[in-house]
Every structure is written in structure tokens, then in C-alpha cells.
Image (cartoon, grey):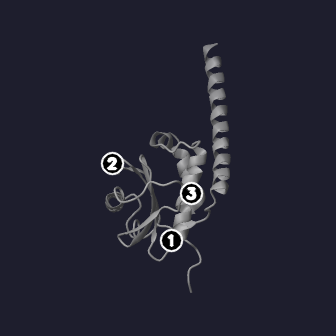
């Protein structure tokens, strides 16, 4: 019987200029497997895979809009759907047995949600300044590799709610600090 739960093996964002990791989240085999999460061997395996991704796609892919499904390739027996932007290369990695359309839908959802959250400015600097939003987006879409959500409007709404709560908490904290400073100075 075919598994009806769609999964991915990783989401990777690389610097478009030099291929360095901006963000990566891997799920299960073969990137973690029997290796401990965060171990040196696992990290080296992931970095080597990212170098292969960049080398294979950097000059061979096309730069497209988020409305497209992205380009597709095979790297080390993994299906990889990717989108190349001059500053950021985005990759969604799945097994060779996973439905390419589902992998592509994750990429489109990720990119569209980030465009919305970053006010249509998908730049490396903007993304790094809002790294918390990126991690929230990925966490709302994927859980332990299982695709939970591929609708950018739903993910945008969920992440916006979290971001608003965080902003309120920061504002309250600033007010408390200001009151404490005022009391200390009196």
C-alpha cells in the first residue's frame, strides 16, 4: 500500500553568490539517520550535499517567479525542486519516490509566504533580519518531514499571528524596562 502522507527530507537556502548556507533544516534519513543530530559527521554530510546542490544548479537553473513550480533535478538519489534568485537559492529535497508536485508545492508555498511576510522584498539581508519568520514559516509547513500545509495564505495567516504576538511581547517588555529605568533614576 502506498504511503498517503507526503514527506520531504529537507529545506535548504543557499547564498546565490557563494553557495554558503543561509538556512537548512533536514528531516530523518539520510541526513540524520543513525548519526546524532548536530554531530560533526552529520554536519559534514549536510555541507557536502549542499555543495553538490549549489554546484549542480548554480549555472544550470533558471531564475523564475514564485508562480512557477521551480526547476527539478536529481542529486545523490534525492529529488530536488529548486528556485534560483540572484541572492538566494531555495531547495526542497525529497526522496526519489516522493511526488514531485508535492515537493514543488512546498517550494511555492515557502517562497510565496516569504514574499508576503517580507513585503515583496526577497533579499538576503531582509531574510536574515527576519530569520525568526523564516523558521516559523518552515515549522508551520513541515513537522518532522511531514508536509502539513502547502497553502501560502494559510501559512501567512498563522505566522502573522505568531509575529504579532511576539511584537506585543517585545513592546510590553520595553515598557517594563522603561518603567524600571525611570524608578531607578528617581
Pointers 3 and 2 in contact (C-beta within 8 Å)? no
CA gap between label 1 and label 2 equals 27 Å
Q: Residue at x 42, y 46 (%)?
A: 87
**Residue at which label 2 appears:** 18
Q: Residue at x 46, y 39 (%)?
A: 125
Name the spot of residue 123 as percent of width and height, x first: 48, 43
Q: Is any part of residue 125 visible from this angle?
A: yes
Name the spot of residue 153 as percent of width and height, x first: 66, 54
Q: Residue at x 61, y 64 (%)?
A: 148
Check disc 1 and report its element: helix, strand or loop: helix
Residue 155 versus residue 90: which sits nearer the camera? 90
Instruction: Name the quarter where the C terminus is drawn.
Output: top right
Check disc 3 and report its element: helix, strand or loop: loop
Label at residue 67:
3
Frontmost of labels 1 and 3 is 3
Name the spot of residue 79 as percent of width and height, x first: 43, 70
Q: Residues within 10 Å of mark 3 (few under 14, many from 20)?
A: few
Residue 18 versus residue 146: which sits nearer the camera? 18
Residue 109 versus residue 45: which sits nearer the camera? 109
Check disc 2 and report its element: helix, strand or loop: loop
Most extreme residue toward the top is: 186
Label at residue 134:
none
Q: Tell me: 174 left or right of 128.
A: right
**Residue at which label 1 appears:** 100
Name the spot of residue 82 as percent of width and height, x first: 45, 60
Instruction: Name the quarter where the N terminus is drawn.
Output: bottom right
Amino acid at each position: 500500500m502506498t504511503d498517503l502522507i507526503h514527506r520531504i527530507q529537507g529545506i535548504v537556502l543557499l547564498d546565490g553568490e557563494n553557495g554558503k548556507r543561509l538556512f537548512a533544516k533536514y528531516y530523518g534519513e539520510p541526513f540524520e539517520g543513525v548519526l546524532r543530530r548536530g554531530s560533526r559527521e552529520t554536519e559534514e554530510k549536510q555541507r557536502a550535499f549542499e555543495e553538490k546542490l549549489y554546484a549542480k544548479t548554480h549555472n544550470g537553473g533558471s531564475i523564475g517567479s514564485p508562480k512557477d513550480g521551480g526547476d527539478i533535478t536529481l542529486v545523490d538519489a534525492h529529488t530536488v525542486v529548486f528556485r534560483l534568485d540572484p541572492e538566494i537559492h531555495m531547495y526542497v529535497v525529497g526522496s526519489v519516490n516522493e511526488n514531485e508536485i508535492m515537493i514543488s508545492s512546498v517550494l511555492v508555498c515557502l517562497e510565496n509566504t516569504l514574499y508576503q511576510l517580507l513585503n515583496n522584498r526577497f533579499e538576503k539581508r531582509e531574510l536574515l533580519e527576519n530569520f525568526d519568520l523564516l523558521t516559523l514559516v518552515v515549522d508551520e509547513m513541515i513537522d518532522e518531514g511531514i508536509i502539513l500545509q502547502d497553502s501560502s495564505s494559510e501559512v501567512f495567516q498563522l505566522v502573522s499571528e505568531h509575529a504579532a504576538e511576539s511584537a506585543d511581547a517585545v513592546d510590553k517588555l520595553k515598557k517594563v524596562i522603561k518603567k524600571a529605568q525611570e524608578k531607578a533614576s528617581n
